[in-house]
Image (cartoon, rainbow, N blue to C red):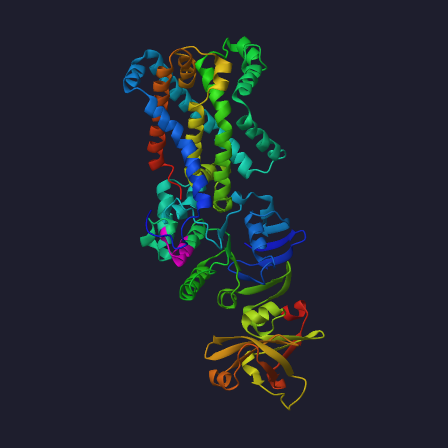
């Protein structure tokens, strides 16, 4: 069962996505890029033009009830008056299964997601991570052909999100349908996805494997997501890692091409290093050791010079079609 | 008072009018209680006319509340969830009976359901039944005045729960009717219950439209308010006693329901 979606919402979105069974497509892009609109249009909760062929059936011609897609919403939308078990059993029951078998199926899925002991709790009595597990069980219990995950880890504690990400990865590996994952997080895209689709202003800016997109991002947003500096140079893009950047208080003497003057705007721990946000003629990020950060007094407002060796810079074509080949 | 408010004392400029407001609401009721002769209360309760009227009031108000719910809940849902042409106009028209003087409501009902009314005449020809001067007519008048309150407050409750859950139910395969039954209504239940109490209370106090449309026949159309109005003209003490009974019934129902349903966050 393949997906061939060409959806347009006039003035907001014009996006093509194709997928094979078992694919996990990550949709990334800045706020307002149209990620959620695309997913809601596939679910039938938002009007869109075009077509979305799933195994030959056009989803857009069907009511949301008939589309057989599973949706995990950003805010979960678990029914607050029903127990976790009845939330998960809601789908099978709505599709005509008798109560006891719907509940049996629901129990099985709660077990798979590791929350069987919470079956009788109401959503208000669940933590964010537990609620998201119930929501994932609710979306998968109906055995959908298409699973839509709208920022499933947003709002969760970092540790909870990390555990859930690993588990979701296992379930997605077993899932025979197609998964579309809307995410803000590079880690989601890089660890869960088979294909990354980068949206920008309602259009596809880049399509590629996670490795391709991470190595040669075509948009500023994705470069930031994966932690790279990307500079446009005519039709070429030049990417380099923040770890390769040298920071100094005075203008460096070496080649003029790869050096920039700027002001430190922010500094935050990043792994073992301190990641600096520097604005100036270019907005760049640079990693320095905590010792260097203290020595150079790299606090917000400090003027600095950044430089990078030419050997640390990757140069590639800026056109989306060339990059996805 | 439970401890000191960390934000400081409430300012007099707000406290004084607030106390005045509470007084305007409570003093007349207290005065009425004080003026009533307790023996008169027993006499009033013993009188057949009063018991008939009380029963009629309670039963017709309950019937009107249920009828309003059956037709009002779907109307409120339609206004809250379905974008149809003219929905704003319909919403505006639904409110009109709320602001209409009850006597005018009675005359409007007569034009529609009177023996020679728009619907009343063909209805009489077809079935031999006419609403005016019957207990059904009382219920009809009550529905006419109570329905707007019920529709508007349920619509508000449906809007405040939002349509997000409806969308989630749809993606799970639930038809709109299933979603209505299993998601929309349960989530709006506190608001629906409050709307039902409001409709019941509005019916219980209905006077103008009822007497205009149905007259004042003991046992069939004489409700408590009409009985009190009639009694007031001959025996002021009896009217006081009847009024107190009505006050007690109303407060009793409110208190009984408050604990169960009206505790909304």
Q: Is residue B119 visible?
A: no
Q: Locate residue B141, reporting x and y percent.
A: 49, 20
- Compared to residue B74, the image places residue A264 above or below, namely below
Q: How many marks?
A: 0
Front-lying residue, B219 or A317: B219
- Quadrant that contains the N terminus of chain A: bottom right
Q: Quadrant of residue A132?
A: bottom left
Q: Quadrant of residue B39?
A: top left
Q: Is residue A193 visible?
A: yes
Q: Locate residue B102, reporting x and y percent.
A: 52, 21
Magenta stretch encompasses residue A127: yes
- Compared to residue B120, the image places residue B261 above or below, namely below
Picture residue at 63% right of the left edge, 50% below the top:
A51
Picture residue at 56% right of the left edge, 65% below the top:
A196
Picture residue at 47% right of the left edge, 82% below the top:
A290
Picture residue at 46% right of the left edge, 44% below the top:
B14
Front-lying residue, A136 or B255: B255
Q: Quadrant of residue B252?
A: top left
- Compared to residue B112, the image places residue A46 above or below, namely below
Magenta-tinted stretch: A125-134
Magenta stretch encompasses residue B177: no
- Quadrant that contains the C terminus of chain A: bottom right
Chief SS of the magenta region = helix
* A11 relative position to B152: left or right: right
Q: Residue furthest bottom?
A: A253
* A301 relative position to B141: left or right: right
Q: Locate residue B206, reporting x and y percent.
A: 46, 22
Q: Residue furthest right?
A: A234
Front-lying residue, A33 or A116: A33
Front-lying residue, A104 or A260: A260
* A167 relative position to A306: left or right: left
Q: Locate residue B89, reporting x and y percent.
A: 62, 32
């Amino acid at each position: 069962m393949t997906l061939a979606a060409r959806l347009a919402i006039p003035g907001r979105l014009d996006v093509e996505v194709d997928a094979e069974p078992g694919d996990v497509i990550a949709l990334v892009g800045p706020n307002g890029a149209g990620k959620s609109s695309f997913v809601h249009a596939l679910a039938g909760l938002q009007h869109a033009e075009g077509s979305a062929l799933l195994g030959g059936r056009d989803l857009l011609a069907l009511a949301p009830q008939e589309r057989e897609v599973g949706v995990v919403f950003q805010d979960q939308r678990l029914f607050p008056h029903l127990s976790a078990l009845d939330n998960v059993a809601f789908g099978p029951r709505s599709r005509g299964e008798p109560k006891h078998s719907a509940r049996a199926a629901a129990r099985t899925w709660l077990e798979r997601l590791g929350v069987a002991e919470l079956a009788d709790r109401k959503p208000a009595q669940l933590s964010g991570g537990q609620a998201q597990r119930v929501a994932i069980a609710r979306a998968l219990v109906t055995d959908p052909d298409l699973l839509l995950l709208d920022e499933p880890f947003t709002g969760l504690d970092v540790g909870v999100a990390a555990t859930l990400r690993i588990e979701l990865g296992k379930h997605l590996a077993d899932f025979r349908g197609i998964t579309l994952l809307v995410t803000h997080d590079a880690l989601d895209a890089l660890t869960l996805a088979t294909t990354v689709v980068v949206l920008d202003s309602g259009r596809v800016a880049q399509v590629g494997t996670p490795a391709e997109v991470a190595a040669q991002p075509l948009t500023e947003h994705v470069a930031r997501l994966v932690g790279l500096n990307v500079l446009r140079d005519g039709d070429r893009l030049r990417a380099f890692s923040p770890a390769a950047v040298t920071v100094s208080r005075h203008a460096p003497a070496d080649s003029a091409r790869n050096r920039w003057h700027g002001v430190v705007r922010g500094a935050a721990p990043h792994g073992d290093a301190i990641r600096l946000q520097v604005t100036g003629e270019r907005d760049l990020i640079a990693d320095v050791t905590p010792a260097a950060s203290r020595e150079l007094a790299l606090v917000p407002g400090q003027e600095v010079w950044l430089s990078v060796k030419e050997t640390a810079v990757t140069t590639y074509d800026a056109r989306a079609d060339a990059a996805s080949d | 008072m439970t401890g000191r408010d960390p934000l400081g004392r409430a300012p007099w400029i707000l406290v004084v009018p607030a106390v005045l407001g509470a007084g305007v609401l409570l003093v007349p009721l207290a005065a009425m209680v004080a003026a009533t002769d307790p023996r008169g209360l027993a006499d009033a309760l013993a009188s057949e006319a009063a018991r008939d009227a009380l029963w009629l009031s309670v039963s017709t108000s309950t019937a009107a509340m249920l009828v309003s719910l059956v037709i009002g809940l779907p109307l409120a849902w339609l206004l809250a969830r379905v974008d149809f042409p003219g929905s704003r106009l319909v919403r505006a028209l639904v409110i009109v009976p709320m602001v209409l003087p009850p006597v005018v409501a009675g005359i409007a009902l007569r034009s529609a359901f009177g023996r020679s009314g728009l619907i009343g005449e063909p209805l009489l020809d077809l079935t031999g039944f006419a609403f005016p001067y019957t207990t059904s007519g009382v219920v009809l008048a009550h529905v006419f005045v109570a329905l707007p309150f019920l529709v508007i407050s349920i619509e508000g409750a449906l809007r405040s729960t939002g349509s997000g859950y409806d969308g989630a139910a749809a993606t799970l395969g639930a038809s709109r009717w299933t979603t209505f039954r299993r998601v929309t209504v349960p989530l709006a239940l506190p608001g629906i219950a409050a709307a039902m109490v409001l409709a019941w209370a509005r019916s219980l106090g209905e006077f103008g439209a009822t007497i205009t449309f149905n007259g004042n026949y003991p046992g069939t159309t004489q409700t408590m308010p009409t009985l009190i109005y009639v009694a007031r003209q001959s025996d002021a003490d009896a009217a006081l006693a009847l009024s107190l009974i009505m006050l007690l019934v109303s407060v009793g129902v409110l208190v009984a329901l408050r604990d169960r349903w009206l505790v909304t966050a």
